[in-house]
Image (cartoon, rainbow, N blue to C red):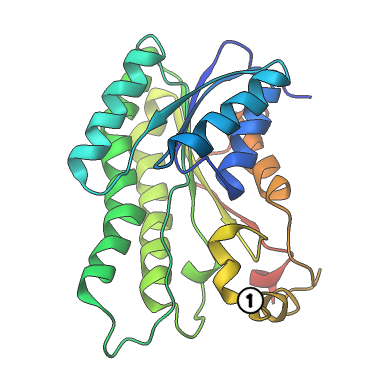
Amino acid sequence: MRDITGRNALVTGSTSGIGRATATVLAGQGAYVLITGRDQERGDEVVDVIRAAGGKADFLRADLSDASSADILAELALDTAGGRIDILVNNAAIGALGATAGFDEALYDNHFTLNVKIPFRLVGAIAPTMVERGSGAIVNITSMAGQFAIPGMAVYGACKAALGLLTKNWAAEYGPSGVRVNAVSPGTTRTPFVAPLGDALEGLAAQSPLGYVADPAEIASAIAYLASDDASFVNGVVLNVDGGRTAI
């Protein structure tokens, strides 16, 4: 098992799904994990699970609805973790299906705020503190929808494509200072986030060579790898964890 004891991790959107699985894995490997989300009860429940297993975690409530909320979270996280965040996982996201024509403008803006602006602000606030120490790992969660067309996912896919390119730019910007920036691009994964897809989820999964819907823990394992010293020479990579879907 990887040992990241003594490191502090901030995982956004970590009260369910891939974020929760990632927080649990990182805590199991010795990190002190800051759980974030909008629901206090769900956040407390994740913290209780981690602590019951012998890990260290606290919950920071954050709605991440605008730039100022990201700035507030960054400041609170740094204060809570003693001024040091070693691992930042940008996982919080929104995704809605819809045709381009008639797509609600407010919903469009919400997508780009949470999926692009919030990671941008968090990296801008936290990466410089990593640069000062000469080390740190940032992992962004993109999507296979940001790499090829999926009907009805134009807005969500555009957001994730933007985050993928930001990952590469940040890797170039912060890499010389010892801060690695990578991304994980999940395929179909069984989370509350994709529950609205219903039976269509199985159909999407069937298009990949492995042909099944992933468990969040399978994605979390890849995220934890990129956050660890095992990936010490990995920088600027978008790692596809999609059962081979982008390989065909």
Q: Residues within 10 Å of mark 1 (few under 14, many from 20)?
A: few
Which of these two is toward me, 76 or 44? 44
**Which residue appears at 35% of the width and 12% of the height?**
83
Q: Is residue 8 visible?
A: yes
Q: Is residue 218 left or right of residue 178?
A: right
x then y, percent, for residue 233: 59, 33
Point out the residue furthest to the bottom here: 101
Up-down relation of residue 209 to residue 109 (above or below): below
Which residue is more in the foreground, 16 or 26? 16
Relative to 171, is 241 above or below? below
Q: Position of residue 118 (x, y in %)?
A: 30, 46
Instruction: Give the image quarter of residue 64.
Output: top left
SS for dot 1? loop
Instruction: Give the residue at the far front of this rendering.
Output: 41
Give the image location of residue 195, x and y in percent: 59, 67
Residue located at (65% from left, 32% from top): 24
- Residue drawn 36% across and 32% down? 174
243 left or right of 145?
right
In the picture, measured across the screen, residue 99 lies left or right of residue 197, that is: left
Q: Which quadrant holds the C terminus?
A: bottom right
Q: Amino acid at mark 1?
A: Gly
Q: Quick check: can you spot residue 131?
A: no
Rendered residue at 68%/50% (across/down): 216
In this rendering, the count of numbered labels is 1
Which quadrant is home to the N terminus? top right
* Drawn side of residue 119 relative to residue 189, left or right: left
Q: Which residue is mark 1?
A: 198
| Figure check: 246 above or below 42 | below
